[in-house]
Amino acid sequence: MPNLRHHIPRKKRPSIKDVAERSGVSTATVSHVFSGKKHVNEKLARRVRRAATELGYAVDRVASQLRSGRARVIAVLVPDLEDLFLNRFVSCIEARAESAGYEVIVSCSRNDPTAEVSRFRALMAWRPAGIVAIPCRDSFPSELYDELGDTPIVGADRIRPGEVPFDTVTIDNFSSGRKTTEHLIEKGAKSILVVTATIDLFPAQERIRGAEEAVREHSDTTLSVLEIGSEPASGADRICAWLTSNAKPDAIVGLTNVTTLATLAALAQRGLEAPEELLLVGFHDSLWMTARKVPVTTVAQPVDDVARCAWERLTIRMAGETTPSQNIVLSSQLIERASTKRSA
């Protein structure tokens, strides 16, 4: 019996010409719709996309890259995708890039400098049109500068402004730390515990520095710093251990959403309530901070604005702008809620 497998015709992959014929436009117009190189009337663009969907057409990104020398791809490198700030940042960049006609490739280094170098090289293999990077530490690996070539890059968040030869968008964490501490001092706090995942990261260092400066101006106020790691459960245990070995502070500041969550878990274990027994402030406002019997006073970080500015700078660089690098620093906002409002 003959082997019929060799007689089954393969289904022909739809081409850009097929899409053009079905939508009644030129192949150039179809190309412009999917490349974004030239503006196409939205009504016409919808017709082209509908025809492509009906035919099952997909852009061959590899072929496009070979023809143009650079893919219409934006690469995003971050240290952690579980962190709410970083997760939101990536989402905002994706939305802006996709609306501009770019595909987005996201890679996570998991806070490992060695993995960061490897992930960067994997992203560069795509020959992206631009890169947005939040490094593991406060700078960008210098050994990667030569490999970067002329690919535009913008750094954000953890990076130390002025330490790299490209545009950066960061937050004034020093002012955030100072503002938070001053708020607690005004509320009568004489002893403040700052809970951080690590003191190795630039944003945490700046928040602590701001807090320390505020305390120096009040000789009757003390500040302690506790490092608990990035796991809420084990972090809560470390906070409980600290509370067992030390006098209860008048206030606790969680320097991230994770350390704030760990603090709340520790207070629950110890049977302590905010604001009656101590004041509580968290960082990076999240829905769960308000969906509580006692909403948490927080520092709302402008993550959407960080992403917007990073995208705007990258767009300018991809367009060929060669002016000196800019370091944009944005401000955060302290939102007072019940966790720092004691009843009179």
Image: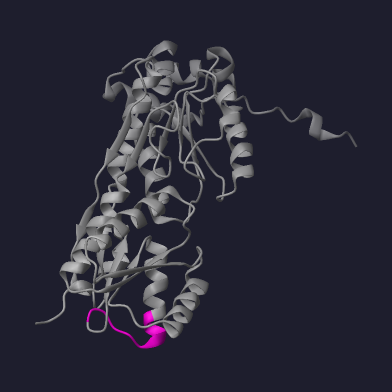
Which region of the structure is painted magenta? 267-275
Total number of numbered labels?
0
Could one spot residue 25 in this view of the protein? yes
Q: Position of residue 58 (x, y in %)?
A: 51, 28
Viewer-side residue, 80 vs 38: 80
Relative to residue 303, is residue 30 drawn left or right?
right
Residue 252 location, x and y as percent? Answer: 32, 71
List the single residue furthest toward the left: 344
Answer whether residue 47 is visible to the viewer in this image.
no
Q: How is the image coloured?
A: one colour
Relative height, residue 340 to residue 51 (above, below):
below
Residue positioned 35% across, 32% down in the render: 311
Q: Which residue, as the protein is rendered here, is positioned at the far right?
A: 1
Q: Is residue 271 magenta?
A: yes
**In the image, what residue occupies the spot 18% across and 65% down?**
336
Q: In the image, residue 40 lies at what x, y percent?
A: 31, 18
Where, by quadrant of the figure, is residue 258 drawn?
A: bottom left
Q: Quadrant of residue 37?
A: top left
Q: Quadrant of the N terminus?
A: top right
Q: Is residue 177 left or right of residue 241?
A: left
Task: Please determine whether, in this image, residue 5 is positioned above or below residue 81.
Answer: above
In what quadrant of the picture does the C terminus appear? bottom left
Residue 62 position (above or below residue 339): above
State the residue in front, 120 or 7.
120
